[in-house]
């Protein structure tokens, strides 16, 4: 027999084991530690992240260099290098000294040789470059317009012969570098070559550095929108749900059009530029925005399918959310619970961005035999650690959301099994209970669930739209169907470990006398659309602002970070309803199936709602796979 089969014997054995351990459904108070084996791995993972952060702050050059560039001494343009020295050794051997390192009013990097015949980064590093207050707008032969080294207060023609003053050429600022206005058919400008030769990670994290304030402002807007949505769904569920469904489709469609228009505009501008002066960042931007536009269009299509195929079932989702609101009304502390993970996430976002920027700026200074600074060599091993940093970022964010969901599950379950009489410190008790006993289980779930849910969703869509049953899809879905978010609910109620909680939750739903899978699935989908509503609105606003202000020309990482970060912030608020609704479903199933008729905890309103849903048409959408029907 297949270990993952849905046979009646499997149902009976699992339910019998669960019923013997817990003869009466209720929140288990006596628990033991679960899945503690993963805690040392998580601690080691964070220890590695801490070591990476220490080296990033120690070896990372001033992050402003990612944006403004440097001069031939290693001073970063646009900053006070005396307060934050970059190349102490180089300055000590130079003829200038530290009195010429205060460059706060000189943000533009200027190459004294406008054109370049080599692509060698080491050769480019030896080119004479200065920091200027502004790029020269005219080419001049006048002595008064000469650009001289920092220690030459009075320009003169004799200094030009000595290589201490230079004739200015007409230029324009591009990425804070002075790019000449005149073009040569077979030579690229030195500034453009320097821009294109930069390490890809430096380009990415330079965009993070320049958009840091914008990203935080967009995330603050996401916080406000999510909290407003929580208030609306609490008091005006029907209006909030239908507004969420239709506005999510509208906003996703608008975002797709915006991304498509912006990417095409970037492509046309790129083609119009002389090939020798093209900046590769622009083409990467075009490719990224075009791909993101396609993904957004697919999600928009899926949202429209939800409305078309499940319009009737959405009314049942509204009724379930109304029932959920009763629990939240009796447990008012649930309304302020999202603020705790929000502040943790906000602090973690700031930490992640800061470390990521310093990782991008990590470079090793190079000197010639005389001890003079000649350039930077990329610290590739340290920059490669950004992958570990990103994995830790996603794992920790999911872990924070997991704690929220398990806490809500424990509180709502205690409220339910007390005949809706439990109040007071129910939420706080639930938090300490699940945090102490199920810390490892939440760590494990927050790592496994995101890994399995994305391929499962993709394969479900493939089977749904192709109307074909692929053996590879069925094999994966059959082995992973018991791994679902209901495991968090079982942790909160009974204190099971992750694997056991997943299997128990799946088989409890499958073996229930009353069908509730369709309504919980469409409810989860509606709440998921609410998250997409916030993500699309915030991302669209960020794209428009960055496009209008020309804050950065490399949008890849800022947009990706904005999408991921705003999604997790939306989860802080919307997962209150996700976890509460799923908890009501599991509590009702066990109460309905196992308790004697004279000791049911559910209300007649809740019973009639689930019975009406059980007689309704099943959910027709790939997210609502057969395992929930």
Image (cartoon, rainbow, N blue to C red):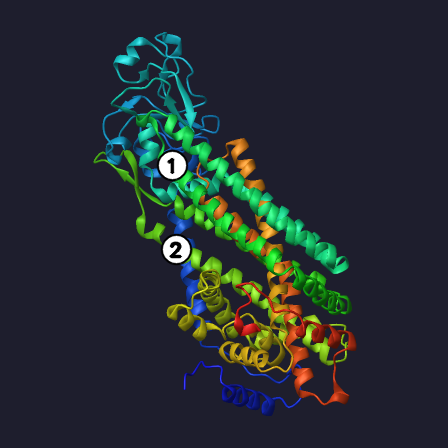
**How many labels, in total?**
2
When asked about the image quadrant of residue 269, the answer is top left
When asked about the image quadrant of residue 530, the answer is bottom right
Which one is in front in this view, the residue at disc 1 or the one at disc 2?
1
In the rendered image, residue 39, in percent from the top left (x then y), is placed at 47, 72
| Quadrant of the rendering where the N terminus is positioned | bottom left
Within-10-Å neighbours for mark 2: few <14, some 14–19, many 20+: few
464 vs 600, left or right, is: left
Q: CA distance from mark 1 to mark 2?
A: 24 Å
Residue to which mark 1 is pinned: 283
In the rendered image, residue 268, in percent from the top left (x then y), is placed at 42, 30
Disc 1 or 2, which lies upstream in sequence?
Answer: 1
Residue depicted at x 49% and y 85%: 7
Residue depicted at x 64% and y 90%: 23
479, 40: nearer the viewer: 479
| Quadrant of the rendering where the C terminus is positioned | bottom right
Label 1: state its secondary structure: helix
406, 24: nearer the viewer: 24
Extreme bottom residue here? Answer: 20
Vertical placement of residue 619 versus 89, above or below: below
Vertical placement of residue 84 versus 606, above or below: above
Residue depicted at x 73% and y 59%: 237
150, 490: nearer the viewer: 490
When asked about the image quadrant of residue 218, the answer is top right
Taking the image as drawn, is residue 270 in sight?
yes
417 vs 571, left or right, is: right
Taking the image as drawn, is residue 101 in sight?
no
In the rendered image, residue 613, in percent from the top left (x then y), is placed at 68, 71
Residue depicted at x 26% and y 35%: 121
Residue 387's mark?
A: 2
């Amino acid at each position: 027999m297949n270990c993952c089969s849905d046979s009646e014997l499997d149902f009976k054995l699992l339910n019998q084991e669960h019923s013997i351990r817990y003869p009466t459904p209720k929140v288990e108070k006596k628990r033991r530690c679960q899945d503690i084996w993963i805690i040392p791995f998580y601690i080691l993972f964070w220890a590695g992240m801490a070591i990476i952060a220490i080296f990033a702050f120690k070896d990372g050059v001033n992050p402003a260099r990612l944006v403004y560039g440097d001069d031939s001494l290693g001073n970063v343009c646009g900053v006070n290098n005396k307060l934050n020295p970059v190349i102490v050794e180089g300055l000590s051997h130079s003829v200038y000294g530290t009195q010429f390192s205060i460059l706060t009013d000189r943000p533009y990097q200027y190459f004294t040789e406008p054109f370049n015949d080599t692509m060698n980064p080491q050769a480019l590093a030896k080119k004479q470059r200065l920091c200027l207050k502004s790029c020269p707008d005219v080419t001049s032969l006048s002595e008064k317009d000469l650009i001289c080294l920092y220690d030459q207060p009075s320009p003169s023609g004799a200094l030009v012969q000595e290589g201490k003053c230079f004739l200015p050429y007409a230029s324009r600022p591009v990425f804070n570098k002075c790019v000449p206005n005149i073009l040569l058919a077979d030579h690229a400008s030195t500034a453009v070559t320097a821009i294109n030769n930069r390490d890809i990670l430096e380009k990415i994290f330079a965009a993070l550095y320049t958009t840091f304030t914008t990203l935080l402002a967009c995330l603050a807007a996401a916080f406000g929108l999510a909290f407003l949505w929580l208030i609306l769904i609490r008091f005006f569920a029907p209006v909030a749900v239908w507004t969420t469904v239709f506005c999510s489709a509208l906003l996703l469609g608008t975002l797709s059009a915006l991304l498509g228009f912006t990417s095409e505009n970037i492509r046309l501008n790129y083609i119009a530029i002389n090939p020798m002066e093209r900046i590769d960042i622009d083409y990467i931007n075009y490719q990224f925005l075009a791909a993101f536009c396609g993904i957004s269009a697919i999600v928009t299509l899926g949202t429209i399918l939800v409305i078309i195929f499940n319009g009737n079932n959405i009314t049942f989702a509204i009724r379930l959310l109304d029932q959920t609101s009763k629990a939240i009304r009796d447990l008012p502390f649930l309304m302020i619970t999202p603020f705790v993970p929000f502040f943790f996430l906000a602090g973690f976002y700031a930490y992640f961005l800061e470390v990521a920027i310093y990782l991008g700026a990590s470079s090793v200074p190079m000197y010639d035999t005389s001890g003079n600074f000649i350039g930077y060599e990329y610290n590739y091993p340290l920059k490669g650690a950004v992958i570990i940093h990103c994995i830790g970022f996603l794992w920790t964010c999911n872990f924070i959301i997991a704690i929220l969901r398990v806490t809500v599950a424990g509180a709502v379950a205690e409220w339910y099994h007390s005949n809706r009489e439990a109040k007071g410190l129910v939420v706080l008790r639930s938090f300490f209970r699940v945090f102490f006993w199920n810390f490892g289980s939440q760590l494990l779930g927050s790592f496994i669930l995101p890994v399995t849910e994305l391929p499962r969703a993709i394969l479900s869509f493939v089977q749904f739209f192709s109307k074909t049953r692929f053996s590879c899809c069925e094999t994966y879905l059959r082995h992973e169907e018991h791994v679902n978010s209901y495991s968090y609910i079982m942790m909160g109620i009974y204190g099971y470990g992750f694997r056991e909680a997943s299997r128990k939750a799946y088989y409890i739903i499958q073996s229930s006398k009353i069908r509730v899978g369709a309504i919980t699935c469409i409810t989860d989908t509606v709440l998921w659309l609410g998250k997409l509503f916030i993500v699309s609105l915030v991302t669209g606003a960020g794209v428009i602002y960055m496009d209008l202000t020309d804050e950065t020309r490399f949008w890849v990482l800022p947009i990706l970070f904005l999408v991921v970060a705003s999604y997790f912030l939306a989860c802080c608020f919307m997962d209150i309803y996700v976890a509460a609704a799923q908890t009501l479903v599991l509590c009702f199933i066990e109460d309905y199936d196992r308790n004697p008729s004279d000791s049911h905890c559910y209300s007649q309103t809740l019973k009639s709602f689930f019975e009406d849903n059980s007689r309704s048409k099943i959910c027709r959408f790939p997210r609502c796979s057969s395992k929930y029907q």
